[in-house]
Image (cartoon, rainbow, N blue to C red):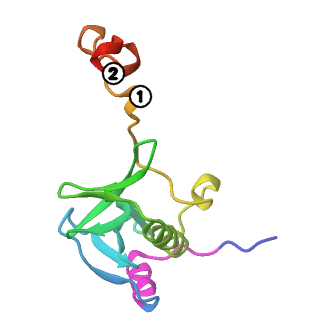
Amino acid sequence: MPKKTKPLSFDEIVSRLRSLQFDVRPASQGANGMLVAKYGCAAVLAPAEKGQGAVLTVKSGVLLAGEIAHILDRGFQKMLTNSKITVAATADRLKALHLFQEELTEVIGAESFYNQALGTTSDVYMYDRVKGRDLPAAKRPVPAWELPAETH
């Protein structure tokens, strides 16, 4: 029968992350949070409520312009976006983010899900063909294929 491992304390997790060459420093967002960075990616961790372990308070993302950027799927391309900048998500950045998430998940003892283990998953999906679908019918934009031929 497999042995149960004792959950690590938040301080033990921070120490282990530092020993694995993660950059760990106090986060500007959230009290008690620690910004954890490696491979140009980052996340914010905080102590779990019961005193054992850590929880993600800001999901993993790529560091761009000093902020954590998350993945936006536009249907034709994945983008990295934060409050300052939106750029194309290159294969190198996505690989780095996936590796960062794998290592961080293992150290903090979080569950690893099958679909996330296959590769990066998007935080937001915004396809142009469904743009405005949540608006009332009278305010929805008319799709190009429904416009008269002479207007496009």
Which residue position holds label 1?
129
Residue type for callout 1: Arg
Furthest toward the right, the residue is 1
Q: Would you say residue 45 is visible in this rendering?
A: no
Left or right: 2 with respect to 74?
Answer: right
- Count of numbered labels shown in the rendering: 2
The secondary element bearing badge 1 is classed as: helix
Q: Which residues are magenta?
A: 5-18
Q: Is residue 17 magenta?
A: yes
Question: SS at mark 2?
Answer: loop
What is the x, y in percent for residue 116? 57, 56
Residue in the image at 35% along x and 70% along y: 42
Within the image, what quadrant is residue 24 found in?
A: bottom left
Mark 2 residue crowding within 10 angstroms, few (<14) / some (14–19) / many (20+): few
Between 70 and 149, the one lying in front of the other is: 149
Q: What x and y, as percent, mark residue 87?
A: 30, 59
Residue extending farthest front: 150
Dot 2 or dot 1: first in sequence order is 1
Residue 16 visible in the shown view:
yes
- Determine which of the numbered discs, if any, sits on residue 134 in the image: 2
Whole-angstrom CA distance, mark 2 to mark 1, is 12 Å
